[in-house]
């Protein structure tokens, strides 16, 4: 097939969450159809897509049938099994490709990747077993954060270590005692807790032609490890913004990525920028771009996946995006009554504490 997917073509989306929902909405507005592959019935993305395959990621027949209906595919979350990507990738292009996604699935590989890139991270060590953890804590110091290498998000799979005696409890808290013997890749990483002044992120887009366009850095505030607010612009010194944007652009280029790459970073009191983690997909900290930028992150991803020229990511307004979590649902009527509030609900049936149910964005004049 041609590298370019013309309007009227169908984009496959692995994953059924709210990122997939907003991607499907952007694709529809640009004249494309979407087919969501997600094991869950009535997932948020399926409510906005043209088709939905509700089948496991390890179902070769369903994956093959899915591949036969689409012209290209992308992921709205990075933890899609490699075998599923290989099955569909044999028939249609997947953008970003499986290599970029595999690095994004593994915190140890992320750290190694950014070190090769010359970007600074917090001091860290790979951890295969409890003995490694105890030794690593002695080397990098306390407090430290123990994180599973894979499948961790919104604070899941993490435990803080404040004393040398706390290593065993942290190891058990993340499931280390259930680790099978002989694992080749690190089960976890441990990193020194960073004293930072703020957390920022940059979303870089890279097109099929190698063109890179970055959304400007934004400032993120977390509540119980879950993103709560994103503020654009980030309000950091120009040198910090330049360094952060450069890291994201270099990473996208080094990955030969086609699509989006979000890079989360810490800014220290002395102006250093430390990479925390990356996600080769749309990102929660990019919701504000829907209302405040010339081209949203979702339209930009459609452009990259379809081989179109990238759009202009310039900010038209200042913006504050606030996540609506399950415990915040009582605030929704107020947002609905506020003409200044741009409200997005994700169509999730059950509100649970910590579950992202929607978001609201408020715009002000560009500064």
Image: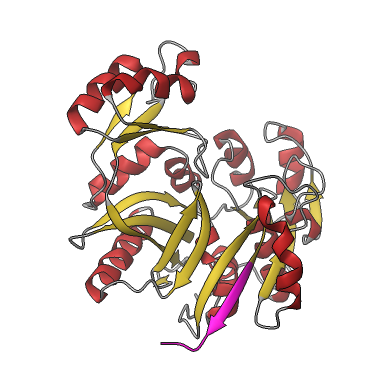
Q: Is residue 256 above or below residue 366?
A: above
**Residue 85 picture location, percent across and down:** 59, 41
Q: Is residue 77 magenta?
A: no
Q: Is residue 145 above or below residue 32?
A: above
**Residue 309 picture location, percent across and down:** 51, 76
Residue that appears at 50% across and 84% down: 317
Direction top: furthest residue: 181
Asked whether, in this view, residue 301 is left or right of residue 49, the answer is: left
Instruction: Please say whether residue 112 is visible from this viewpoint.
Output: yes
Q: Main secondary structure of the magenta part?
A: strand
Asked whether, in this view, residue 331 is left or right of residue 268, the answer is: right
Q: Is residue 361 magenta?
A: yes
Asked whether, in this view, residue 58 is left or right of residue 241, the answer is: right
Q: Which residues are magenta?
A: 360-367
**Residue 322 picture location, percent across and down:** 57, 65
**Residue 95 picture location, percent across and down:** 54, 55
Quadrant position of the C terminus in the picture: bottom left
Residue that appears at 26% across and 76% down: 238
Q: Depth check: 363 or 242 in front? A: 363
**Total marks in image:** 0
């Amino acid at each position: 097939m041609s590298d370019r997917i013309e309007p009227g073509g169908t984009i496959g989306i692995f994953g059924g969450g709210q990122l997939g929902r907003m991607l499907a909405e952007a694709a529809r507005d640009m004249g494309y159809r979407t087919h969501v592959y997600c094991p869950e019935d009535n997932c948020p993305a399926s409510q906005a897509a043209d088709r939905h395959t509700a089948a496991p990621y390890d179902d070769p027949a369903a994956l093959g049938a899915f591949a036969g209906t689409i012209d290209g595919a992308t992921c709205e979350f990075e933890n899609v099994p490699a075998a599923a990507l290989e099955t569909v990738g044999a028939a249609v292009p997947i953008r970003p490709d499986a290599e970029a996604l595999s690095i994004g699935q593994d915190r140890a590989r992320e750290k190694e990747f950014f070190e090769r890139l010359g970007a600074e991270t917090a001091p860290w060590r790979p951890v295969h077993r409890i003995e490694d953890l105890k030794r690593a804590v002695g080397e990098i110091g306390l407090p430290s954060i123990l994180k599973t290498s894979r499948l961790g998000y919104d604070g899941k799979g993490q435990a803080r270590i404040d004393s040398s005696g706390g290593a065993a409890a942290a190891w058990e808290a993340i499931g280390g005692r259930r680790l099978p013997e002989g694992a080749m890749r690190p089960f976890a990483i441990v990193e020194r807790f960073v004293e930072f002044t703020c957390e920022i992120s940059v979303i870089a887009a890279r097109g099929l032609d190698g063109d890179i366009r970055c959304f400007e850095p934004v400032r993120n505030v977390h509540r119980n490890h879950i993103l709560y607010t994103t503020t654009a612009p980030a309000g950091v010194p120009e040198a910090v913004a330049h360094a952060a944007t450069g890291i994201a652009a270099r990473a996208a280029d080094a990955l030969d990525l086609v699509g989006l790459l979000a890079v989360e970073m810490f800014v220290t009191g002395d102006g250093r920028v430390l990479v925390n983690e990356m996600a080769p997909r749309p990102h929660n900290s990019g919701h504000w771009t829907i209302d405040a930028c010339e081209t949203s992150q979702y339209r930009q991803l459609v452009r990259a996946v379809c081989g179109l020229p990238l759009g202009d990511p310039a900010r038209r307004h200042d913006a504050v995006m606030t996540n609506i979590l399950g415990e915040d649902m009582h605030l929704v009527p107020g947002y609905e009554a506020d003409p200044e509030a741009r409200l997005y609900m994700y169509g999730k049936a059950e509100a649970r504490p910590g579950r992202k149910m929607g978001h609201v964005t408020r715009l002000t004049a560009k500064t």
